Amino acid sequence: MYITRKPVQKSPLFSLKLPFVRENSGSYHVKPASPGCPKMPVSLQLRGYQRQAITSWFANNGRGTLKMATGSGKTITSLAIACELYHQISLQVLLVVCPYRHLVSQWARECEKFNLQPILAFENLRNWQSQLSTQIYNLRSNSQSFVTVITTNSTLISDGFQSQLKYFPPKTLIIGDEAHNLGAPKLEESLPRNVGLRLALSATPERYFDDGGTQSLFDYFGVVLQPEFNLQDAIAQGALVHYLYYPILVELTEAESLAYLKLTKKIGRSLQYRERENGDVGDFEDNEDIKSLLMQRARLIGTAENKLTALRELMATRRDTTHTLFYCSDGSPETGHHSSLRQLKAVAKILGVDLGYKISTYTTHTSLQEREKLRCQFESGELQGLVAIRCLDEGVDIPAIQTAVILSSSGNPRQFIQRRGRVLRPHPGKERATIFDMIVLPPDLDRETIEVERNLLKRELRRFVEFADLADNSGEARMKLLALQKRYGLLDI
């Protein structure tokens, strides 16, 4: 099993002291800071769990993973660590690596609050390489005190960036944002070994279907630190808002039911074969054939036709709704780009054309400038809603979201947790969020497949039940799921 706790490794070049954290203030040691050097914002008040996380990281000698709920302030916590390192050891470089371009811009906004002047290193080399090499040279020649670099995963692995990394000094802190992505082999191999101070940030650091990648991630950054801070903790402490949860049960069409049954039988036969070969089924998620079948079935569920009917019925009675996010199925490489946008286009037509909502789509092809424009229009209420796919799952900060309609929930718990936290971020005037979650009901199955379905459904239901239990209307939400639990004998969840 991964997440093994290894002996703490001390940096060979410097030692860290536990930071002095004042009870009623976010400030650490006040040290005059030149432009571009880390400095805590005067008005910042760190929460108790953030102070504890900082202390844990220093106690682990500058290594570790912060597993904190989406929206609970991981960015601020990590920048506070950079400020303390600057005071303690005269930290010289802050390197932030994040998965998407829009997160670079988001990090830049936060860094500027901490007196930092970041180099945004992504896309065209001409935009950043000269600036980075000049500042690293200035650093090494003592004519500059601090350098902040924010880059993307794809730029990190490029030859242009790798050629610069070897000149980064030992007093560099690398922060991996949405760090679960960095467990992928090519990315993990590109992480700098000469950098000793390492911090991973993720609400869900464990990689889905990839125990080896998860272990590699923890081997590099360090183990999950205490306190872990989950959704229940975040709501209880006011870091996230309360919410109402409304499951919407959706039936498959006849054609979809036949396809679903066919896939479920194939999954069952694969499981039986595996049991004969190995003596037991074990963790079937590490089997590529079974995983492929599960993904095919997940895509079938994600794009179920009756979700569009359910959406029309729901939103026909909510024409005055504002600040609403619609999550659509993102398809996959196997189904092709056109298929991945089919549901998004259908949802946009129902809302924008048929029902007259002021909406816009938000995809990976939306430019950074357009995304910022849409964010402002959404926050002001000029746009009633955004119709989005996966690009809004990780890190995007649009706290004005008050309502979410989830048309597609994958089996990946990370996606579910990310989306949930995205909707619950606090915002002025936002006392509570509302979530409508479309849950596809499996068709009636024969004796051959019902036990297979029961085992597969157990994981899905556990997630829905957890979501229902934390909602303000938990009793109502649980009753909606009760029929499904009874049908498959899963009342113990």
Image (cartoon, rainbow, N blue to C red):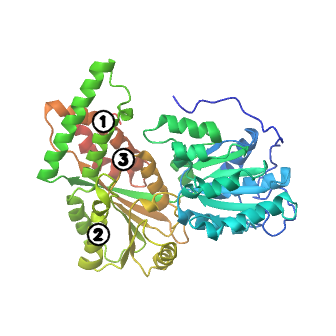
Q: Which residue is mark 1?
A: 289
Of 282 and 333, nearer the camera is 333
The outermost residue toward the left is 254
Asked if 360 appears above or below 286 in the picture, the reply is below
In the drawing, what numbered circle is on residue 111?
none
Residue type for callout 1: Asp
Across and down, in percent, residue 177 comes to: 59, 53
Choose the circle earlier in sequence order: 1 or 3: 1
Q: Are marks 2 and 1 in contact (CB under 8 Å)?
A: no
Taking 224 as reference, is 18 left or right?
Answer: right
The residue labelled by disc 3 is: 464
Q: Quadrant of residue 144?
A: bottom right
Between the residue at mark 2 and the residue at mark 1, the CA separation in whole angstroms equals 31 Å
Query: For the residue labelled by badge 2, is the local secondary structure a helix, a strand or a loop?
Result: helix
Observer able to see residue 140: yes
- Which residue is found at the position 27% from the left and 46% from the top? 296
Residue tagged 2: 345
In the displayed structure image, the side of residue 453 where residue 103 appears, left or right: right
Q: Nearer the viewer, mark 2 or mark 3?
A: 2
Q: Secondary structure at mark 3?
A: helix
Q: Position of residue 298 (x, y in %)?
A: 29, 47
The residue lying toward the viewer, choosing from 340 and 247, is 340
- Disc 2 residue type? Lys
Indicate which label's residue lies in the foreground, 2 or 1.
1
Inspect this view and state whether residue 489 appears.
Answer: no
Query: Can you tell which quarter of the image residue 108 is in?
Result: bottom right
Q: Earlier in the sequence, mark 2 or mark 3?
A: 2
Amino acid tagged 3:
Phe
| Coordinates of residue 239 in the picture (x, y in percent) | 58, 57
Between discs 2 and 1, the one toward the N terminus: 1
**Which tag is nearer the camera, tag 1 or tag 3?**
1
Above or below residue 147? Residue 1 is above
